Image (cartoon, grey):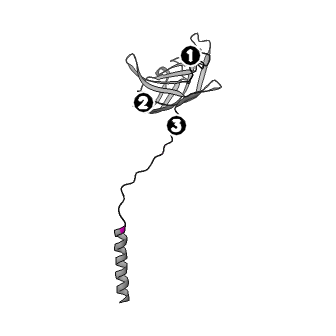
Amino acid sequence: MKRRILLIASALFCIHLFDSCSKEDALSPVINETPKPLSISFQEDSIAIYLPITAARAESIGSVSATAIEGKLPDSVTRKNNIIIRVTGDSARVYSKTEVLVNYTDSTGMTYASNSADTINKVILTRVEKKKNGLVEGSFTIRVSNSTKTKTLLLTNGKISTAFSD
């Protein structure tokens, strides 16, 4: 008799336990990705340069589709540093030599450009989201010269983190 009561009590407890448990909706993970600051930074020879105003956009150079990545300072009247990096393509990959076109203005306002035959020039785009506010990330090493080729700068340890503006 005691066994029968214990068996019935156990069965009622199990039924109550299963009845009180209800299935929840499918849970999805919450991804809290910390937004990266959008900027372009690099070493101009031994001087650290940080350009916080950035944009990326699609361009056409003749019949070639290109991606332009621009960085500048907030006060471009008194502080002239800016850079425009153009790569002949729109995907995440390594660009070098003739695929890289760079215009750079230093803090004194002197302008420089890359030489398309220079083997040191390399831009590595690791992320390209071709949509409004899509991220563009990568790195670069570029040598630029002034128009008379009398002064050359090496832009190294370049880091790109920007967004498409259109």
Q: For the view shown, which residue lies furthest in the bottom direction?
A: 1
Q: Nearer the viewer, residue 161 or 74?
A: 74
Q: Nearer the viewer, residue 96 or 39?
A: 39
Name the residue beneath numbered marker 2: 91
- The x, y position of residue 18, in whole percent, is 35, 69
- The x, y position of residue 151, in whole percent, is 62, 14
Q: Are marks 2 and 1 in contact (CB under 8 Å)?
A: no
Which one is in front in this view, the residue at disc 3 or the one at disc 1?
3
User: What is the spatial separation of the Cα atoms under label 3 and label 1, in whole angstroms?
Assistant: 29 Å
Q: Classify 101 as above or below 14.
A: above
Residue 153 quadrant: top right
Q: Nearer the viewer, residue 1 or 114?
A: 1
Q: Left or right: where does residue 38 sit relative to residue 91?
A: right
Picture disc at residue 4: none
Q: For the view shown, which residue lies furthest in the right direction?
A: 46
Q: Nearer the viewer, residue 40 or 80?
A: 80
- The x, y position of residue 141, in whole percent, is 56, 26
> Magenta residues, as a range?
20-33
Q: Classify 138 as above or below 6.
A: above
- The x, y position of residue 109, in whole percent, is 59, 15
Name the residue beneath numbered marker 3: 36
Which one is in front in this view, the residue at disc 2 or the one at disc 1?
1
Residue 104 quadrant: top right
Q: Disc 2 on helix, strand or loop? A: loop
Residue drawn at x 57%, y 17% is 77
- Bin the neighbour count of mark 1 within 10 Å (Cα to Cα): few under 14, some 14-19, many 20 and up: many
Residue type pointed to by label 3: Lys
Residue drawn at x 58%, y 13% is 146
> Which of the two labelled residues, at mark 2 and mark 1, occupies the earlier sequence position?
2
